[in-house]
Image (spheres, rainbow, N blue to C red):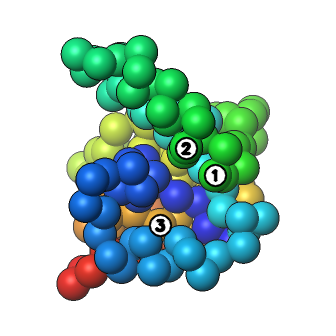
Amino acid sequence: MYLLDTNVLSELIRKSPDSGVMAAVRQLDQSAVFASEVTLFELRYGAMRRDDAESFWARLQRELIPAVQWLPVDRAVQLRAADLAADLDRRGERIGSEDCWIAATALEHRLTLVTRNLRHFDRIPGLRIESWFEGE
């Protein structure tokens, strides 16, 4: 079971998506595909920065958002994310808050995080990560 990072979900709506990502997604049962509500925030934020914000957001709501099961940032995720952030700070390997919440969601739900940013997330102990991008 997989938690898709924002960069993976974004790839699905590109004009020329990565063939590795598309092949992997086609093989999955939709019941095994999740995303964090933090990713929903990131998608909305990115959409609203565009000149065609409303029409692009409508497209995301139609084509992308229904494709996964959305997991909330509940108390367990919040506490784990705070612990991860503190640990990373102590080690001098800080990552952004959103990424701590996404990683914490994957850990709390025992999901493999699929991301293009392996080097970013490989600092988090116990987090299973994969990249489906061609050549990575």
The amino acid type, in three-letter code, at marker 1 is Ala
Q: Nearer the viewer, residue 33 or 18?
A: 18
Q: Quadrant of the C terminus?
A: bottom left
Q: How would you rate the neighbour count of disc 2 (Cα within 10 Å): few for under 14, some for 14-19, many for 20 or more?
A: few
Looking at marks 2 and 3 on the same chain, the residue that comes earlier in the sequence is marked by 2
For numbered disc 2, what is the local secondary structure?
helix
> In the structure shown, which secondary structural element does the residue marked by tag 1 occupy?
helix
For badge 3, the amino acid type reads: Val
Distance CA(mark 1)–CA(mark 2): 7 Å
> Which residue is label 3 attached to?
114
Q: Which residue shows up at 45% across the image and 52% down it?
A: 9
Q: Residues within 10 Å of mark 1 (few under 14, many from 20)?
A: some
Residue 91 position, x and y percent, is 30, 54
Circle nearer the viewer, 2 or 3: 2
| Element class at badge 3 | strand
The amino acid pointed to by label 2 is Glu
Q: Quadrant of the N terminus?
A: bottom right
